[in-house]
Image (cartoon, rainbow, N blue to C red):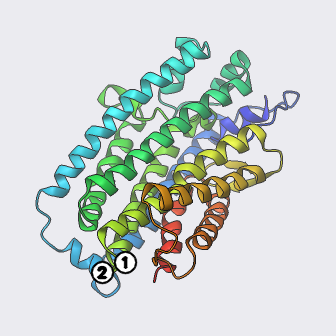
């Protein structure tokens, strides 16, 4: 069994997969696999308490300040309307991405429909043999390329959509905060209920279209954890922003800037690390070991840095003399993206999206006048 397949047995997602086909290993016993599965799920759900605790702390009157006042103010129907709009657009995006994934794997790369159905189906009963079969049929590199193209397209599309939604479709930061608070329970309940594939005609086949093949058994569950942390992260971001004395327009800019490491840094980090990375290191997470590369980490920094400069000077048309930050904007972006590159490399598996956006915002806000 190749090392890629062995990682698939325990749900390992990697930036670089090495082919060591001469190595052999037994698939873990049903008992061992079940114990690991239960332990991983327990740790994953327990981890939710970390972002939830931060949200609750920032919602208190003593610490939250303006965030506390906003949450306890009259909500009205606008946040609910925005949430319905968000998930309507989100569902449309999912349709597009599922059509693309089918075309990419079945027609562009020649995957059989049987294997395609296996990949998009439930993963909780996978043993590792599924990955072995897919790798032996299509080759490790080909499967990795298919996964990367599909995942990075979905990652890019959804995060551009989120930036546009919160910056342009939500009138002020109070609406952004309240809408984000409504989104978290909706997406979390939807993901949890559809993960097993036993409910709602397994619409999880379409909701979990971004699951990595090499995540194996943990393909869907990793996305459950990723989504909870990421959506909780946006609540925390708007809790922090609502406390700022900046205008709502500036807060929108800060949000967009803080999303650049997640949008472009995370994308280019995986692409460069997967196909060109040679210098590897391990990052431990929920149920697996994630191998990343020095080259991918450098790509996270470079792409995030360039993206923040473009967004600040060209998308939002700030001038060089704009007195928004204490230091020169280029210096602020350099430090922020350096922090983002470190966080993306050091964060436990499934939590990097949270830390990328939240800590990037914290760094930007600490640099304001």
User: What numbered label is drawn on residue 45?
Assistant: none
In percent of the image, x 15 and y 73: which residue is there? 73
Residue at 57% across, 41% down: 34
Alpha-carbon distance for marks 1 and 2? Answer: 6 Å
Front in this rendered view, residue 119 or 148: 148
Residue sitting nearer the eye, 353 or 34: 353
SS class of the residue under badge 1?
helix
Residue that mark 2 sits on: 60
**241 in relation to 98, above or below:** below
Quarter of the image for residue 345 reads bottom right
Using the image, determine if residue 48 lies above or below residue 108.
below
Q: Residues within 10 Å of mark 1 (few under 14, many from 20)?
A: some
Whether residue 205 is visible to the viewer of this picture, yes or no, is no
In-image side of 359 versus 315 (left or right): right
Quadrant where the C terminus is found in the figure: bottom left
Please say if the residues under marks 1 and 2 sit with CB atoms less than 8 Å apart. yes
Q: Residue at x 44, y 29 (%)?
A: 97
Residue 39 pos. (x, y %): 56, 51
């Amino acid at each position: 069994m190749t090392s890629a397949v062995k990682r698939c047995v325990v749900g390992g997602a990697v930036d670089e997969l090495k082919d060591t086909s001469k190595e052999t290993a037994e698939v873990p016993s049903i008992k061992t696999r079940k114990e690991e599965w239960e332990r991983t799920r327990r740790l994953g759900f327990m981890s939710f308490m970390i972002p939830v605790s931060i949200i609750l702390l920032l919602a208190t009157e003593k610490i939250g300040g303006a965030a506390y006042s906003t949450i306890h103010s009259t909500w009205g129907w606008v946040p609910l309307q925005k949430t319905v709009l968000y998930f309507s657009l989100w569902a449309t995006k999912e349709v597009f991405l599922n059509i693309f994934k089918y075309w990419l794997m079945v027609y562009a790369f020649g995957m059989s429909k049987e294997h395609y159905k296996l990949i998009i189906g439930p993963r909780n009963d996978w043993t590792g043999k599924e990955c072995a079969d897919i790798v032996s049929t299509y080759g490790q590199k080909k499967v990795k390329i298919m996964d990367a193209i599909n995942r990075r397209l979905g990652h890019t599309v959804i995060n551009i959509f989120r930036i546009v939604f919160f910056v342009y479709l939500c009138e002020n930061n109070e609406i952004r905060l309240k809408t984000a608070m409504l989104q978290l329970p909706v997406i979390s309940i939807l993901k949890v209920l559809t993960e097993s594939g036993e409910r709602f005609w397994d619409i999880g086949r379409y909701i979990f279209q971004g699951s990595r093949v090499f995540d194996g058994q943990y393909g869907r569950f990793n996305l459950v954890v990723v989504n909870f942390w990421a959506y909780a992260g946006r609540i925390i971001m708007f809790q922090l922003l609502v406390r700022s004395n900046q205008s709502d327009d500036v807060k929108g800019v800060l949000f967009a800037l803080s999303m650049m490491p997640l949008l472009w840094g995370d994308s280019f980090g995986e692409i460069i690390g997967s196909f060109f990375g040679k210098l590897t290191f391990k990052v431990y997470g929920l149920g697996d070991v994630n191998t990343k590369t020095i080259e991918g980490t450098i790509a996270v920094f470079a792409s995030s840095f360039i993206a923040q400069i473009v967004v600040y000077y060209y998308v939002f048309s700030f001038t060089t003399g704009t007195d928004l930050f204490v230091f020169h904007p280029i210096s602020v972006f350099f430090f922020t993206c350096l922090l983002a590159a470190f966080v993306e490399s050091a964060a436990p598996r499934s939590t990097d999206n949270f830390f990328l956006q939240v800590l990037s915002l914290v760094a930007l806000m600490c640099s304001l006048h």
